[in-house]
Image: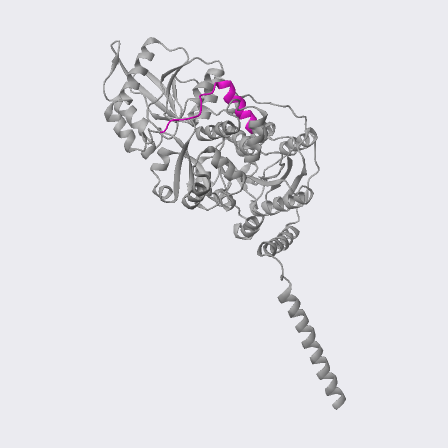
Amino acid sequence: MKKNKGIVIIAAVGILVFAAVLGGLFLTRNLGKSSSAISQESADKKLEKMVKKIEAKEVPARKEAVELSTTSLQDELPDIKTYPLTVQPATDLYVEIMSSPEKAGDGTDGWFNEVAQKFNQQGYEVNGQPVSVAIRNVSSGTAVEYISSGKYVPDAISPSNTFWGEMIKAEGVPVEMLTDRLAGNVAGVLLKEDKYNALMDKYGAINMKTITQATIDAEIIMGYTNPFASSAGLNFLVNTLYTYDNNNILSDAAVEGFNSFQTNIPFVSYTTMQMRDAAESGALDGFILEYQSYANLPDLKREYIFTPFGVRHDEPLYAVGTLSEDKKQLLNMFKGFCLTDENQKLASEYGFNNLDEYVSETPEFDGDTLIKAQKLWKENKDVGTPIVAVFVIDISGSMDGAPLNMLKESMINSMQYIKSDHYVGMVSYNNDVYVNLPVGQFDLNQQAYFKGAISDLIATGGTATFDGIAVGVDMLEKALTEHPDAKPMLFVLSDGDSNTGYNLNDVRDILETYAIPVYTIGYNADIAALEKISSINEAASINAETEDVIYKLKNLFNAQM
């Protein structure tokens, strides 16, 4: 009996010792590890478990012949009705003016619209005919593409700055500057107050040289907008190049300087709104914006200090093409109306006509140079760092018909804007998840497989969006073990929210830990659901209606790929 009792005691002690050892191992398993390493391990295990449960199916790859540059700019641009008139003409004789959004939008961005509406109510005549104006709100870069391609040519254009007029001229389209200023404005760098003060203490001034050097030295995290579409973005690009060579912004020295600067740029935003969201989340110390917008955003004025840069954004006005004498007279009449004291006072109330003392030190550049600078940016923006991208495509039943057809057309067209030294893979999903194309370098061979995979997509079944995202992230993470210096990106193309499988909360912490930006492209979609996904890591969410998805994808890939 005593012997048995002793055995029980020894066994109990052994169990306690064993438990203590296990407990010690458990409690000390993370000693010496950073919190980020612990989060990474946790995300790895969670993702592995999810992917194992999903059991993605491999789809045999099929090649399809690749045709380079299959779609012209004229075909890519959507019908002009995508950008409806913000002011309708009131007479048979009228001029249509394409205007930049900061003055042809709503509220304090609607100065040009209000002036045009007042003008149309005045009863003006030219040679005995009643006259009026029509305004169309189109971003400066897009307006130039409509005009230069011949897709749609208005009577006049009022871009944010003079760069765009020079670019239209370089494309061989006749333009005549009627005035270099309708309302005063400037582009500027916004810096958080503490960063501004720190840079002032160190450098004694805030200018483009200070900004570029502080970015290179990782003293600030800086963001800017796509120079193909944004006036401030193009201005910022040109002035960055000018900082490194004020004799030739296309020289090797300018490119080398730009590359050293670009290395520390976390992302180039697709839109100004995306960049402002990133700033509000704390991801950026500085970004670019026009003063008129800054003046109307009290929160920004409290937290950021504005420093002007580059050429002024004084909203010039150009006549486009060969106009009749009546239309020329009408345009000059409207120009004079905009410049009256009453209408300039209204412009000031809406944030224009500030910082008139600012004089640009940047010279004017001809259109050919500006177009070459854009191309230079496209070629050098990744600074030799490849991108690993996985496209996650919704093939649920609701994508059948027009949405999937437009997705296929837009993706096949947009292939030409993905650089061949990047790495691309593809996943599709309905109730299940399919690996249509493993990640590989986007050379002609991979492009042929990519096109074949896109062409073979068929829509049916439910919508397991987050299952697809989980498999896409797993593919990215595995590819990054082979290409550790690459930048990961996920593109989700869908028409809305998930209705089966995992949900957003299941993948949120994984996306946050891996810091993978998820760009969402909605095809006639529930865009709010997609915006939630993109907002996790400050990526863009694009509402691509069937009429303009080709153009929007082109712009997105120009900015990111």
Query: Can the viewer see residue 543?
Result: no
Query: Can the viewer see residue 531?
Result: yes
**Can you say whether 158 is above or below 530 in the image?**
above
Indicate yes or no whether the magenta region holds residue 368: yes
Q: Which of the two residues, 332 or 407, is positioned nearer the viewer here? A: 332
**Can you say whether 102 is above or below 98 in the image?**
below
Looking at the image, which residue sits at the far bottom? 1
**Residue 35 position in % (x across, y down):** 57, 56
Indicate yes or no whether the magenta region holds residue 183: no
Please give the count of numbered marks on the rendered protein: 0
**Residue 206 position in % (x across, y down):** 43, 36
**Residue 62 position in % (x across, y down):** 70, 33
**Residue 181 position in % (x across, y down):** 34, 22
Q: Is 212 situated left or right of 334 in this image?
A: right
Name the quadrant of the N terminus: bottom right
Q: Which residues are magenta?
A: 358-377
Q: Is 454 situated left or right of 293 in this image?
A: right
**Can you say whether 128 is above or below 534 in the image?**
above
Q: Is 1 situated left or right of 227 in this image?
A: right
Q: Quadrant of residue 262?
A: top right
Task: Identify the residue at horizontal 61%, vertical 53% (top origin).
Answer: 40
Coloration mode: one colour
Name the quadrant of the C terminus: top right
Q: Quadrant of residue 316?
A: top left
Q: Which of the two residues, 57 or 7, is positioned nearer the viewer here? A: 7
